[in-house]
Image (tube, grey):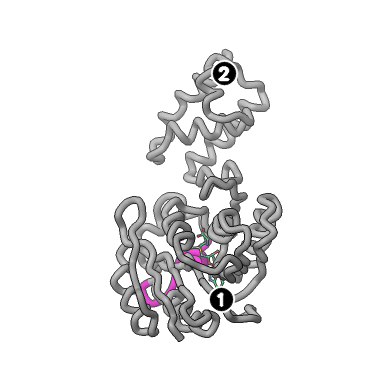
Amino acid sequence: MNVTILTCMRRAQELKNSDSARLDVELLLAHIFDKDRSYLYTWPEKCLTEDQQEQFESLLGERLKGKPIAHLLGHREFWGLSFEVDASTLIPRPDTETLVEAALSLSLPIEAKVIDLGTGTGAIAMALASEKPSWHLLAVDHSQAAVNLAQRNQQRLQLSNVIVQSSDWFNDIEDSGYHLIVSNPPYIDKNDPHLAQGDVRFEPLTALVAEDEGLADIRHILHQGRQYLLPYGWLMLEHGYRQGAAVFQLFEEFGYQQVKTLQDFGYNDRVTMGQFVG
Ligand SMILES: C[S@@+](CC[C@H](N)C(=O)[O-])C[C@H]1O[C@@H](n2cnc3c(N)ncnc32)[C@H](O)[C@@H]1O
């Protein structure tokens, strides 16, 4: 029997554990044909070759086991840019675009110096660098595999205003005098039941989990960040949707001013920022 695009699309009903089953199958097929999704609707009767059928069965099988679509495709879009992803770090999330938007809305000098701590794929740093070619971005991660991944993304996206290097938070950052520090650090409590659900099961705990109910890395960054900021420099952190009040209080405890918490597209507290007057 001929296996067509349409018959494959109908296999979405097998993906009972996914809340985006139809989209998942479309993305897998578009990947196999190396076309965008509109191709599938234009040519529903097109037959898959034997190789394509094997590839489809293998990818669908992996998806049935819960493997994230981004890992199966090898990339994920963030801020309109395509990022290579792998198991070394977090798959970029749409919520993080709230932080990018907030950073871009600040009035910073043309040649602002900016750090992205825990850069992962490089999503935040590259998004900022693509919008502000004259900013100087330093993107760091403690995972060498994540640093390698972010470097590949930087080269593919041809963003010459980003330097990616390895560092355990600020430990290997040599200079100071930054206008802005941004970070989406690990902030999930180790007992959070979400860790056993969905895509996060395939992401490393070192990218997700922090001590002290998820606040340990946030506290560390707020504490150390003050030495790296210029007077009136900004620090901006992504956090969990229930951590808004606690993170706001930490910003104030560490002496930051003009503190505010911003909500993501789902109206959840997501980003808190403050200015270090010095
Ligand atoms: C939540 S992920 C965010 C990744 C990326 N910035 C994003 O928004 O998609 C946190 C990142 O922090 C990194 N990280 C964890 N502990 C770190 C540390 N001590 N120093 C530097 N990076 C760290 C992890 O490797 C991971 O890439």
Tell me the CA gap for discs 1 and 2: 57 Å
Query: Which quarter of the rendering shows the N terminus?
Result: top right
Any mark on residue 139, and which?
A: none
Is residue 27 on the magenta stretch? no
Ligand 1 neighbours mark 1 (CB distance < 8 Å):
no
Which segment is the magenta one? 204-213
Q: Identify residue type, mark 1.
A: Tyr
Q: Are marks 1 and 2 in contact (CB under 8 Å)?
A: no
Q: Residues within 10 Å of mark 2 (few under 14, many from 20)?
A: some
Number of marks in the image? 2
Q: Main secondary structure of the magenta part?
A: helix
Residue 176 position, x and y percent, is 60, 81
Displayed quadrant of residue 145: bottom right
Which residue lies at the image location 47% right of the left edge and 63% below the top edge? 103
Rendered position, 38 above or below 251 = above
**Residue bearing the label numbered 1:** 178
State the residue in front, 147 or 213: 147
Residue 176 in view here: yes
Circle 2 sits in a helix, a strand or a loop, which is it?
loop
Circle 1 sits in a helix, a strand or a loop, which is it?
strand
**Residue bearing the label numbered 2:** 3
Residue 156 position, x and y percent, is 69, 50
